[in-house]
Image: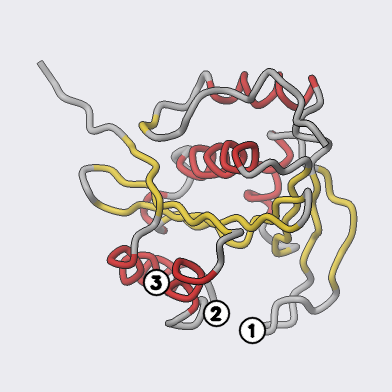
Amino acid sequence: MQVVPRLSVERMRFDDIAAVQQIEREIFLSPWPKNAYASELSQNRQACYLVLRRDGVILGYAGIWRVAREAHVTTIGVRASDQHRGLGTVLFAALIQRAYEMGARWITLEVRATNLHAMRLYERFGFKAIGRRRGYYTDNGEDAVIMWSDSIHAPAFKQRFATILTGVDAAGLGGGPPQEYPAA
């Protein structure tokens, strides 16, 4: 019998920060400052940061803030050697699940204009490009594409999300979208 290592989505802990920063240095031109994650984990009660593990090894990470009725994706990254294997889908699905838990109505994010692979991932979840932030990325002056979801409580969004979840196998991801619509 072969045991297939299972992916698990977990809340980021302080002792995960070094591994997350190692991944960031590997995949981003300008990673977050050294103390940014520690500050987010200890002080930002409107934030949720996650890691994706296999056999105890962190393969990726993601973060989201809740601002009023909106959830804002702050970061998402997968180790370079593990990219293009569906791990970004797992992390993004986990962020959407957390947005539901946080009581958000919409989700927004910025993505580098040249990151077509990421944009296709977000579009698969139903996100649309709605604008551009000129020179947003300070490391090279690249534009950011602003992407938004429709209401994450709309039947079409929930249906799409539930369908994507059927192809995702990771512990800690949670169930599908909630059936009820949130009160005010």
Q: Depth check: give the residue in front, 164 or 172.
A: 172
Q: Colour mode?
A: secondary structure
Residue carrying label 3: 21
- Binning the other alpha carbons within 10 Å of mark 3 as few (below 14), some (14 to 19) or many (20 upward) gives some
Residue carrying label 2: 30
- Amino acid type assigned to the residue bearing label 2 in the image: Ser
Marks 3 and 1, the one that precedes in the sequence: 3
- The answer to whether the residues at label 2 and label 1 have Cβ atoms under 8 Å apart is yes
Q: Depth check: give the residue in front, 112 or 50.
A: 50
Where residue 102 appears, as percent x and y from the top left, is 63, 44
- In the rendered image, which quarter contains the N terminus? top left
Q: Quadrant of residue 46?
A: bottom right
Above or below, comparing residue 46 to residue 118 in the picture: below
Marks 2 and 3, the one that precedes in the sequence: 3
Image-based side of 18 in relation to 62, left or right: left
Above or below, comparing residue 144 to residue 49 in the picture: below
Tell me the CA gap for discs 3 and 1: 17 Å
Residue sitting at x 64%, y 84% = 139
Mark nearest the camera among 3 and 1 is 3
* Outermost left residue: 1
Residue sitting at x 54%, y 24% = 165
Tell me the CA gap for discs 2 and 3: 11 Å
Marks 2 and 1, the one that precedes in the sequence: 2
Which label number is shown at residue 107?
none
Mark nearest the camera among 2 and 3 is 3
Residue sitting at x 64%, y 58% = 65
